[in-house]
């Protein structure tokens, strides 16, 4: 019996040795998981893009903004001149936090009066809200404490109450419900899983069923074949979007404040990019099993680096650069912006441009990989 088991085991090892793609993935996947989990995943959110609405324009107000940036939790990306500009910045995703300094900030502190600064936070990402609010509150409390000590030491100065207080306002998701953040993101994740997987086996299935010869002798060009295999699955993608949006609204009470036609229009590019990627995997794989393995291999960096599970600002800069090549990174910003903030086309024209470029590259790669002869 042991002899027969040994023969079967040896036969299986020899088959694995011939499957170089599977062996490569067995070696690369653990290393990739180690790097992603150990290096790229970080729940300590830093470098949050921040805008400043300084209504005082004094040395003290500018010093407060610089102190906020010095914590490294905030990156001041610009100055705004009203709440409408704050709304545009948060809606487009160019900023996640806004510091509002009131007029007469410096004069109130000089006269010994209390003053209040405001922190406006984008609540569509609850993890960012906690980090941004707690850090700012600690900074204001420390600065206020120092001023209070100086007032107590200064003769004739009033020391009633904290010199500076912080008012934190959370927009778009004031209750910080996790479902409001997760459900829109699931649209992108589930579309990636199904779209890539469905088309990853397309050409391989043709080869295994013996129907690839019909495509070989046909007058269809490579680009036409790629696009033709993509189009039917686009309808499936739209059905999935509709189901997730409907279930999210009915079951989890997730708001939808933006334009549904705009979301569907931008989703077309995202769906097509994932289908093109799956088709590219299909041209690389020899069997459906290999195509499936490549699909699962691709899902790991998508979920971990796109900002679906962890705040994008918490990811190290090199990993952020890498994630720009993932369609899901840009679509998550689009779908959350439209559904939760009511963002418009102008707010995400840059993200759409990224997805269009990725789509063009993937279609070109899949077209070049497809060869009209049986290998």
Image (tube, rainbow, N blue to C red):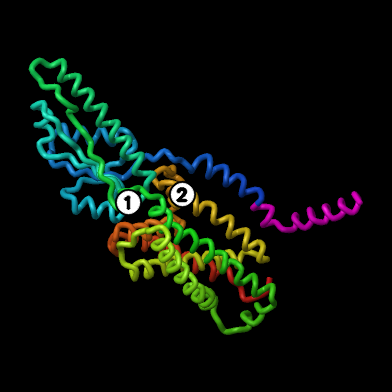
Q: Nearer the viewer, mark 1 or mark 2?
A: 1
- Taking the image as drawn, is residue 249 in sight? yes
Quick check: marks 1 and 2 in contact, CB under 8 Å?
Answer: no
Q: In the displayed structure, does residue 111 sit left or right of residue 303?
A: left
Examine the image and state in which quarter residue 344 appears: bottom left
| Label 1: element kind | loop
Question: Which residue is under mark 2?
Answer: 309
Examine the image and state in which quarter residue 263 appears: bottom left
Q: Using the image, determine if residue 196 lies above or below residue 179.
A: below
- Taking the image as drawn, is residue 350 in sight? no
Residue sitting at 10 percent across and 20 percent down? Answer: 157
Question: Which residue is under mark 1?
Answer: 173
Q: Using the image, determine if residue 86 lies above or below residue 352.
A: above
Which circle marks residue 330 in the picture?
none
The image shows residue 309 at horizontal and vertical percentages of 46, 49
Q: In the displayed structure, does residue 150 sit left or right of residue 18?
A: left
Residue sitting at 50 percent across and 54 percent down? Answer: 302
Q: Main secondary structure of the magenta part?
A: helix
Q: In the displayed structure, does residue 61 sit left or right of residue 325?
A: left
Q: Using the image, determine if residue 122 lies above or below residue 185.
A: above
Residue sitting at 46 percent across and 58 percent down? Answer: 186
Q: How many marks?
A: 2
Q: CA distance from mark 1 to mark 2?
A: 17 Å
Residue range highlighted in magenta: 1-25
The image shows residue 16 at horizontal and vertical percentages of 75, 55
In reply to whether residue 310 is colored magenta, the answer given is no
Quadrant of image for the C terminus = bottom right
The residue sitting at the front extreme is 251
Q: Is tag 1's residue or tag 2's residue first in the polypeptide sequence? A: 1
The image shows residue 8 at horizontal and vertical percentages of 84, 55
Residue sitting at 46 percent across and 46 percent down? Answer: 319
């Amino acid at each position: 019996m042991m002899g027969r088991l040994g023969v079967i085991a040896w036969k299986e090892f020899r088959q694995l040795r011939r499957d170089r793609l599977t062996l490569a993935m067995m070696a690369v996947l653990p290393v990739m998981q180690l790097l992603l989990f150990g290096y790229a995943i970080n729940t300590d959110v830093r470098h949050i893009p921040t805008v400043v609405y300084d209504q005082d324009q004094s040395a003290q107000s500018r010093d407060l903004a610089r102190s906020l940036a010095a914590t490294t939790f905030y990156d001041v990306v610009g100055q705004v001149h009203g709440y409408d500009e704050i709304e545009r910045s948060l809606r487009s995703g160019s900023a996640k936090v806004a510091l509002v300094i009131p007029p007469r900030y410096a004069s109130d502190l000089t006269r010994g009066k209390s003053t209040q600064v405001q922190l406006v936070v984008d609540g569509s990402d609850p993890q960012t809200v906690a980090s941004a609010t707690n850090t700012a509150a600690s900074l204001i409390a420390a600065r206020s404490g120092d001023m209070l000590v100086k007032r107590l030491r200064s003769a004739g100065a009033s020391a009633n109450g904290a010199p500076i207080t912080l008012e934190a306002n959370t927009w778009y998701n004031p209750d910080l419900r996790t479902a409001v953040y997760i459900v829109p993101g699931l649209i992108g994740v589930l579309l990636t899983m199904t779209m890539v997987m469905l088309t990853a086996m397309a050409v391989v299935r043709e080869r295994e069923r013996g129907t690839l010869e019909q495509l070989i002798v046909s007058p269809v060009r490579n680009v036409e074949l790629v696009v033709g295999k993509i189009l039917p699955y686009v309808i499936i993608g739209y059905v999935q979007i509709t189901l997730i949006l409907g279930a999210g609204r009915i079951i989890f009470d997730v708001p939808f404040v933006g334009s549904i036609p705009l979301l569907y229009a931008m989703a077309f590019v995202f769906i097509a990019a994932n289908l093109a990627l799956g088709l590219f995997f299909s041209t690389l794989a020899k069997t459906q099993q290999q195509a499936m393995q490549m699909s699962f291999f691709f899902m790991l960096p998508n979920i971990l680096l796109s900002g679906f599970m962890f705040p994008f600002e918490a990811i190290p800069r090199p990993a952020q650069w890498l994630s720009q090549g993932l369609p899901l990174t840009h679509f998550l910003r689009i779908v959350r912006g439209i559904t939760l903030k009511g963002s418009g086309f102008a707010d995400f024209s840059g993200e759409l441009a990224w997805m269009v470029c990725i789509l063009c590259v993937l279609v070109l790669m899949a077209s070049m990989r497809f060869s009209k002869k049986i290998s």
